[in-house]
């Protein structure tokens, strides 16, 4: 089944009908040559409007952390984006609502099967980390990120690059000092593959 067939199926799914009726399509980026896959929570409001993954300040910081240009991110074919929900779930009291339950279970296995060359999965934020890593629900994102080497070389847990996490980044300078350079080195290696 082709990616466009799966996309049509996603849009026709009853769970997504309210979005489809409003002309909103699913936001993700996949392909057969993807080497680096980013799995996060869900698109934000701005990303939903443009339909372009990480087309916001978070995306700018993520690309900086990865050491790549926007052109490489969107047009190399080697970077994929598969959030836990392909639609903006709405605003909550302190940020966006969590991804809808059952969404990733339904679509991720099929989408991952279409990307056989993935060598690195960057898990952005606690929702993605708890979904994909064998960790306890009680483990904090900071604790998970500190033990990043445990999950390599396939998975790399990182903090969400949102400006909302500037305080976390100031309190945890080891992230940008230690993990970001390793992320950049791995990304460079896979981009040249």
Image: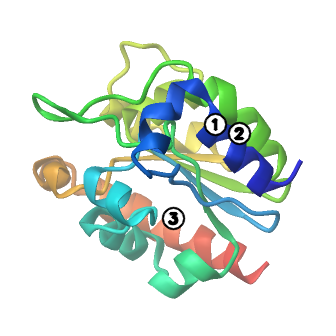
Disc 2 secondary structure class? helix
Q: Residue at x 62, y 30 (%)?
A: 13
The reply, left or right, for residue 32 in relation to residue 145 is right
| Residue density around tag 3, few if under 14, some if 14–19, many if 20 or more, within 10 Å | some
Q: Residue at x 64, y 24 (%)?
A: 105
Which residue position holds label 3?
A: 183
Whether residue 133 is visible: no
Pointer 1 and pointer 2: residues touching (CB < 8 Å)? yes
Which residue position holds label 1?
A: 12
164 versus 188 height, above or below: above
Which residue position holds label 2?
A: 9
Q: Residue at x 36, y 13 (%)?
A: 138
| Residue density around tag 1, few if under 14, some if 14–19, many if 20 or more, within 10 Å | some
Q: Nearer the viewer, residue 142 or 14?
A: 14
Please state the horizontal and vertical placement of residue 33, each as a whole percent of the image: 80, 68
Q: Nearer the viewer, residue 53 or 37?
A: 53
Q: Residue at x 18, y 50 (%)?
A: 165
């Amino acid at each position: 089944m082709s990616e466009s067939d799966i996309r049509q199926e996603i849009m026709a799914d009853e769970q997504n009908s309210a979005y489809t009726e409003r002309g909103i399509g699913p936001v993700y980026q996949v392909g057969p040559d993807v080497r680096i896959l980013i799995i996060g929570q869900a698109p934000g409001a701005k990303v939903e409007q443009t339909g372009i993954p990480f087309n916001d300040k978070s995306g700018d910081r993520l690309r900086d952390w990865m050491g790549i240009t926007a052109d490489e991110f969107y047009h190399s074919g080697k970077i994929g984006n598969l959030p836990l929900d392909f639609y903006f779930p709405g605003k909550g009291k302190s940020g966006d609502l969590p991804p809808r339950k059952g969404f990733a279970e339904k679509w991720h296995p099929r989408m991952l099967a279409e990307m056989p060359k993935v060598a690195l999965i960057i898990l952005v934020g606690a929702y993605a980390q708890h979904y994909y890593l064998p960790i306890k629900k009680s483990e904090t994102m900071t604790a998970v990120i500190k033990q990043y080497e445990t999950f390599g070389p396939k998975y790399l847990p990182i903090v969400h690059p949102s400006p909302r996490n500037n305080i976390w980044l100031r309190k945890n300078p080891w992230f940008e000092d230690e993990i970001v350079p390793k992320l950049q080195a791995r990304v460079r290696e896979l981009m040249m593959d």
